[in-house]
Image (cartoon, coloured by chain):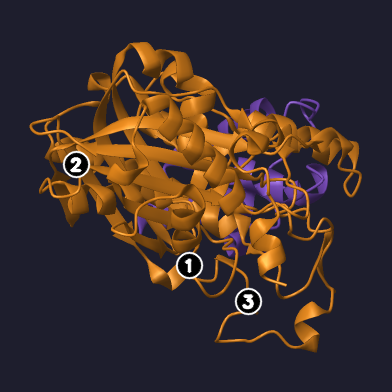
Amino acid sequence: MEIEHFIERIEEEFEDLPGGVLKPTSDFKKVLDWNSINALVMISLIDAEYEVIVNAKDLNNAQSLHDLLELVKKKRTV
Amino acid sequence: MAVFTTRNTRIAGISACVPEKIISNWDYTWIGMKERQQLVNTIGVETKRAVDKYTSASDLCYVAAEKLVEDLGWIKEEIELLIFISQSKDYTIPHNAAIIQDRMGLPRTCVAFDIGLGCSAYVYGLSVMNNMMSSGHIKKGLLLMGDISSTGSRRDKSAYPLFGDAGTATAIEYADGFEEMTFNLQTDGAGYDAIIIPDGGMRNPTTKSSLEFKQIDKGIIRNNIQIVLNGIDVFNFSLREVAPNILSLLERINKTTEDFDYFVLHQANKLMNNAIRMKLKSPKAKFPLSISKYGNTSSASIPVTIVSELQKEISVNELNLILSGFGVGLSWGSVSLKTDRIKCPEVLIYEDHIKNYNPNRYHYIVKSK
C-alpha cells in the first residue's frame, strides 16, 4: 500500500489530470476540482484496489492523499 | 437468509413503454460542461425520457400491458392476477392496480393490488407473482411496474439528471414443471433516508413550508416533496451488498457466474454497475446497460434493460439470467431464472401506441377533477 501506487491509480482514473501534479501532501479535493461524481470515482477506486469502502465522512476528514491512504490502512486492519 | 425457490411459473413475455420526449444531459445547463461530461461518461446517463403533464406511470404501464397481451394472444377473461409496483402512484387512494384492472377490461375475478417498492421492485414482484401462481389455481398474471421521476427538482444536480420515466409489463403463466426460480431478498431499513421524499406522507403531511425551495448544497435546490438522493450512501451500500447477495444465491443453487448468459442489474449508475461486475469477475458483455439511453428508470430499470438490450436474443434463444435490483428502502435482491423464447416487443413509444388502445386517454384524469 505505497502512496506512489495510490497516486498512479488516481492518475489513471482521472484522465484529465496531468501527471506529477498530485503529491502525497496534496489537498486532493482542491486538485481534483472535487464534486460528488469525483467522490464516487475515488470510493470505487479505493474499493477495487484495497477492498475498503470509505464513506462521505472519511473523504471529508482527509485533507491530503497521505491522510486518505492512512485511513484506508486503518479501516483495512479493523 | 431469505433464499427461497418458486416452481411451476414461466415468464411468457416482457414489454416496456417510454414517452417520446428525450432529454439530453448535454443540454443540462444547470451544471458546467465538465460535470455534464462526467454525467455522461462516468455515471453513464446521456439521455432519458420524460412524460408530459398528462401522463402517469400507470399510463405507460397500461400501454406496455395492452401490447403484450395482444402479442401473446391472451384472452383477458383468463387474467386473474395483476400486481402494480410503483413509487409514483396516480392517487394516494386508491391503488393503481384497480384502475388498470378496469381500464384493461380484466375480469372482476382478478386479484389486483399494489406493492410500494423502487429499485428492487422487479425481483420482489416476481417472487410474489410466482408464489401466488405456483399452485396452479391462477394460470395467467400481469406484473406491472414503472415510475415517473422527471418531476424532481431540475435545480438538483444530485438527482434530476439521473432519472428517466418508463413503464413495463411482464406476463407470467402457470407452467407445470418449468425451471424453478431462486430468490435471495434482503432489507436494511437503517438506510431508509438515503433515498426519500420527506413530506407528503402521513409522517410529514404537506404544508406550505413543504413547497419552499431551499439551497441544500452547491447545485442542489429543492423542496420537501421532491426526491432526496444521498448518492454516496447509496453507492457504498451497493458496493457492499449487491455482489455478496448474488454470490450467496449462486452458492445456494450450486452454480457459478459462468452458468449464466446475462446479469441484468438495476441501472443506477454505470460506475457502480461496473464495480459490481468486477467483483463478480465477469466480462462486460454479460452486463447489458440501458442507462445511457433511458437513465435510472427506478422500478422499471430491469425490464427496460431486457427489452432495450436483449429483445432479439430473448425472443429467439433460451437464456439463463441473474436479475438484481437494489436501492430505496434500503432493499435489494437477486433471482436466477431461465427464459425460453418469450414475447418481447421492441421498446414502445407511448404517444405512438396510446391511440390504439384508449382513444379517450384523459378518461381517468377528467374523472378525478
Compared with residue B146, is residue B96 higher up or lower down, i.e. above or below? below
Q: Nearer the viewer, mark 1 or mark 2?
A: 1
Q: Give the amino acid type for the residue marked by disc 2 in the picture.
A: Thr
Residue density around tag 3, few if under 14, some if 14–19, many if 20 or more, within 10 Å:
some
User: Do residues under tags 2 and 3 come within 8 Å of each other at their CB atoms?
Assistant: no
Q: Which residue is mark 3?
A: B198
Nearer-the-camera pick, B321 or B286: B321
Q: Give the amino acid type for the residue marked by disc 3 in the picture.
A: Pro
Residue density around tag 2, few if under 14, some if 14–19, many if 20 or more, within 10 Å:
many
Q: Which residue is mark 1?
A: B95
Confirm whether circles 2 and 3 share one chain.
yes
Query: What residue is shown at x 50% (from left), y 53% (from top)?
Result: B236
Judged from the image, the secondary structure of the residue bearing numbered disc 3 is loop
Where is the C terminus of chain B found, in terms of image quarters?
Answer: bottom right
Which quadrant of the figure has residue A17?
top right
Query: What residue is shown at x 67% (from left), y 70% (from top)?
Result: B368
Nearer-the-camera pick, B172 or B180: B172
Q: Give the amino acid type for the residue marked by disc 1 in the picture.
A: His
Query: Could you tell me if residue B239 is visible in this image?
Result: yes
Q: Which residue is mark 2?
A: B182
Mark-to-mark CA distance, 1 and 3: 21 Å
Q: Is residue B52 left or right of residue B345?
A: right
Q: Chain B appears in which tint?
A: orange
Given the image, what chain letter belongs to the residue carrying mark 3? B
Residue B156: x %, y % from top left: 79, 58
Given the image, what chain letter belongs to the residue carrying mark 2? B
Between discs 1 and 2, the one toward the N terminus = 1
Residue density around tag 1, few if under 14, some if 14–19, many if 20 or more, within 10 Å:
some
Nearer-the-camera pick, B31 or B48: B48
Query: What residue is shown at x 15% (from left), y 49% (from top)?
Result: B4
Residue A42: x %, y % from top left: 61, 43
Numbered circles on residues, count: 3
